[in-house]
Amino acid sequence: MDKDLVVVLSSVGFTNKEAQVYIALLSLGAGTVQQIATLSGLKRPIIYVLLEGLIQRGYVSEIPGKKIRAFQAMEAATVLRRLQADVTNFIQYLPIFKTLGNRGESRPKISYHDTKEGILNVYEEINHDSNPFFVTSYVRLNAHFPGIINRWIKAHKKDFQKKIRGTHIVPDDEGELPYARDYLKLNQQVRIWPALRGARMDFSLYGDKLAISSLGEKPFVVVVKSVDVVSALRPMFEVVWEDAEDIK
């Protein structure tokens, strides 16, 4: 295992053992505790403890539907955005982390997030994409994460996000309109769709990923990373966009 990468992660908030687990998962693409132990040299009992901590911080997610528990690391760029300390060394090594994360098989990668930190990490990733497509509810998001919409609107006003041009489809409800009009002023495309009234699921396309969010009593987000899936679904999103109505 590359000791320089361990040192870099340790300098930005990871313990040495957390860094070893994170790097092992990036290298594997997705892996079991036994696979992590083999690659990192750590004992299985401590790996379980380390994984729980990394999951709570939103840096690792458990893959659902597996007979043997398996885990997947969030992309290194997401870790970078969450860190508030000096990230100079991390930026320098970011291409290496991305290379490690891309060594998996070509089949879709599915990750599941049900912690507050994990869910917010996904939404932060979506909001940094250059051309995201949302089928969402601002009111519902704001109810779960108070103030989050205004925070994103403020972020979009900053220079580094002015090139982001998102497409938003939201329910035809009065509570959605103030946020929708604010996004329209920021060169975002926003329409209302009456069929979304009462819906409790959000859908987002960004890059090569689909995010499906359930914001009910027990919120969670499932992220599917697949060019084929996104290519197949984008025309369907565009049909909904054509059926949606401009905001008056």
Image: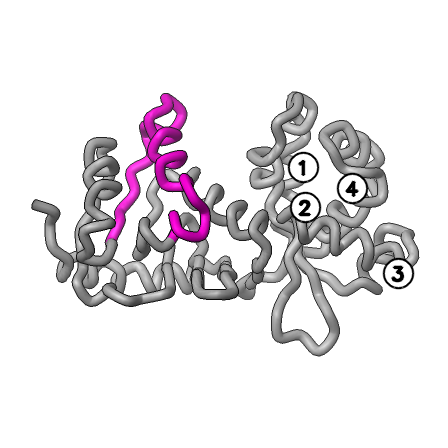
Name the residue carrying label 1.
96
Distance from the alpha carbon under mark 1 to that under mark 2 = 6 Å
Image marks 1 and 2: residues in contact by CB distance under 8 Å = yes
**Residue 60's spot in the image, x, y percent?**
66, 52
Name the residue carrying label 2.
100
Colouring method of the image: one colour
**Residue shown at 44% from the left, 58% from the top:** 211
Sequence-wise, which precedes: disc 4 or disc 2?
4
SS for dot 4:
helix
Distance from the alpha carbon under mark 1 to that under mark 4 = 14 Å
Name the residue carrying label 4.
19
**Residue 207's spot in the image, x, y percent?**
42, 48
The label number, if any, that marks residue 44 in the structure image: 3
Residue type pointed to by label 2: Leu
In the image, residue 105 sits, relative to residue 177, either above or below, namely: below
* 194 lies left or right of 38: left
Label 3 or label 2, whichever lies nearer to me, is 3
* 59 lies left or right of 214: right
